Structures are given as structure tokens and as C-alpha cells.
């Protein structure tokens, strides 16, 4: 087994900013020369998450609205009392989606559906610089 480790640096706006990672992942995979395996993407931190969506403006708005309905920013969270901050919802929203993705790599291509793009969702209440870990395993 061989592991190729790379990183993606992303500056986000916070407040559930959604960033398409497709181009960066394709470039990383191409650079490894790996044809078959798995691509693991992980975002360190507890207020950002990774998922796949059809990356288009309507769905990005729908995702934002859904997460706000599920875990509203202005609700009361014990986390706010503990740390005297305002990002309790961000921690929970990120936890619901999760910090990682595993994407099969087949014949040198990410095995994604036509309307499926891997995205970072930064749920924090402020802009952040995120450094994602990408491992191509074969």
C-alpha cells in the first residue's frame, strides 16, 4: 500500500460558506499518477465539514437554510456559556455532516456522479483559513 499526502488551502467567509473542491482534488490525483485506490479528504477543526452536493447556487442556499432550521445560530447553546462565544451551532452543524470524505478512485478519476461535487462547508461564525488533508491511497 502506498499513501500520497497533499493539502488544500482554503480561505472561507464563514457562516456556512460552501467551497467546491473538485478542481483541487482532480489536480492532486493527477499529480500522484495513481489509477485505482481511494481519496480521503479531512478537515481539521470542529466547525467545518465535508460533504457532496450538486454545487449550484440554489442548492447552496438550500443547504444554508436547512442547517439554520436544524441548528439555528441564535439559539441558546451551553457551549456559549462555557467559552463565551457564539459558534455553538457551528460545532453542531459540522458534527452532523462530519469532517471527512472517502471517494473511490477508478481509472485515475474520482468516482463521483454527474451532479456530485465534493465541498467544504465552513459553519463557523467568522472567516477562516482551512488546511485540508488529502490522502490518495493505493
Image (cartoon, helix red, strand yellow):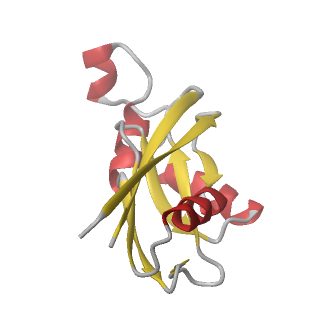
Closest to the observer, 131 or 1: 1
Tell me residue 98's x, y (percent).
Answer: 35, 55
Residue 27 seen in the current view: yes
Q: Is residue 38 left or right of residue 12?
A: left
Residue occupying image coordinates x 65% and y 84%: 114
Quarter of the image where one finds residue 102: bottom left
Residue occupying image coordinates x 52% and y 67%: 52
Residue 73 seen in the current view: no
Q: Is residue 44 left or right of residue 86?
A: left
Closest to the observer, 67 or 91: 91
Q: Residue furthest right?
A: 57
Residue occupying image coordinates x 30% and y 16%: 83
Quarter of the image where one finds residue 27: bottom right
Residue occupying image coordinates x 47% and y 38%: 131
Vertical arrangement, residue 103 with respect to residue 99, above or below: below
Vertical arrangement, residue 5 with respect to residue 31, above or below: above
Closest to the observer, 129 or 89: 129
**The N terminus appears in which quarter of the rendering?**
bottom left
Tell me residue 79's x, y (percent).
Answer: 29, 26
Quarter of the image where one finds residue 118: bottom right
**The C terminus appears in which quarter of the rendering?**
bottom left
Count every numbered label the image shows and give the total: 0
Tell me residue 42's x, y (percent).
Answer: 38, 51
Q: Residue furthest top?
A: 84
Vertical arrangement, residue 42 with respect to residue 122, above or below: below
Tell me residue 44's x, y (percent).
Answer: 36, 40
Closest to the observer, 59 or 109: 109
Amino acid at each position: 500500500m502506498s499513501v500520497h499526502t497533499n493539502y488544500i488551502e482554503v480561505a472561507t467567509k464563514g457562516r456556512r460558506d460552501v467551497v467546491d473542491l473538485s478542481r483541487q482534488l482532480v489536480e492532486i490525483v493527477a499529480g500522484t499518477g495513481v489509477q485505482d485506490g481511494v481519496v480521503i479528504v479531512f478537515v481539521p477543526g470542529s466547525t467545518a465539514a465535508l460533504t457532496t452536493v450538486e454545487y449550484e447556487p440554489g442548492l447552496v442556499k438550500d443547504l444554508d437554510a436547512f442547517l439554520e432550521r436544524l441548528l439555528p445560530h441564535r439559539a441558546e447553546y451551553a457551549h456559549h456559556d462555557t467559552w463565551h462565544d457564539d459558534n455553538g451551532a457551528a460545532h453542531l452543524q459540522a458534527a452532523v455532516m462530519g469532517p471527512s470524505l472517502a471517494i473511490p478512485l477508478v481509472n485515475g478519476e474520482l468516482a463521483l456522479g454527474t451532479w456530485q461535487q465534493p465541498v467544504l462547508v465552513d459553519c463557523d461564525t467568522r472567516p477562516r483559513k482551512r488546511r485540508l488533508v488529502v490522502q490518495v491511497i493505493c
